[in-house]
């Protein structure tokens, strides 16, 4: 698995499409279920938000399906920067997204950070 992360609107998906010659995308930014048969799964932070609201652990979801996403490029928006939200649920989403990103980075063959459309391999 390859993990691509960075801030919102930084060109992560475009970078992944070009860098890894991907053709198909599963977009879960609306909170839907990831389709790990696609080359890229993007918007994982939206899936994390849905999990937290439903009382589910997104890291456990991914760990239980590890063999399904081993050949995917996973694209995650880093929502850990900036002002910490006052809303308890939003803080929980932010924490869960960070924990999932840490887990995925540990499991990844490669990790790429994208900023201003420029990707840099960091693992």
Image: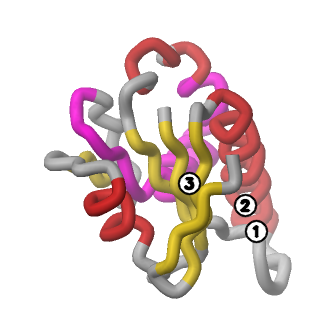
Q: CA distance from mark 3 to mark 1?
A: 13 Å
Name which quarter of the figure residue 30 lies in: bottom left
- Asked if the residue under mark 2 is in contact with the one under mark 1, i.e. CB atoms within 8 Å, the reply is yes
Of callouts 3 and 1, the N-terminal one:
3
The x and y percentages for residue 7 are 59, 76
Residue 54 on the magenta segment = yes
Of callouts 2 and 3, the N-terminal one:
3
Q: Which mark is residue 8?
A: none
Mark 3 or 1: the one toward you: 1
Tell me the residue at 56%/54% (across/down): 49
Residue 20 on the magenta segment = no
Tell me the residue at 51%/17% (across/down): 66
Q: Tag 3's secondary structure?
A: helix
In this picture, residue 38 sits left or right of residue 68 = left
The residue range painted magenta reads: 37-62
Nearer to me, 81 or 31? 81
Q: Residues within 10 Å of mark 3 (few under 14, many from 20)?
A: many
The x and y percentages for residue 84 are 84, 77
Which residue position holds label 3?
Answer: 49
Q: Which mark is residue 94?
A: 2
Tell me the residue at 46%/54% (across/down): 75
Which residue position holds label 1?
Answer: 80
Nearer to me, 81 or 18? 18
Residue 28 visible to an observer of this rendering: no
């Amino acid at each position: 698995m390859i993990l691509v992360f960075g801030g919102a609107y930084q060109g992560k998906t475009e970078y992944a499409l070009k860098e890894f010659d991907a053709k198909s995308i599963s977009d879960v930014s609306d909170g839907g279920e990831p389709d790990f048969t696609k080359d890229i799964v993007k918007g994982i932070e939206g899936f994390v938000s849905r999990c937290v609201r439903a009382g589910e652990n997104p890291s456990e979801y991914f760990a239980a399906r590890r063999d399904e996403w081993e050949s995917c490029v996973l694209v995650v928006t880093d929502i850990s920067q900036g002002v910490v939200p006052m809303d308890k649920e939003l803080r929980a989403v932010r924490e869960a997204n960070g924990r999932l990103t840490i887990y995925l980075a540990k499991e990844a063959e490669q990790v790429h950070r994208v900023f201003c459309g420029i990707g840099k391999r960091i693992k």
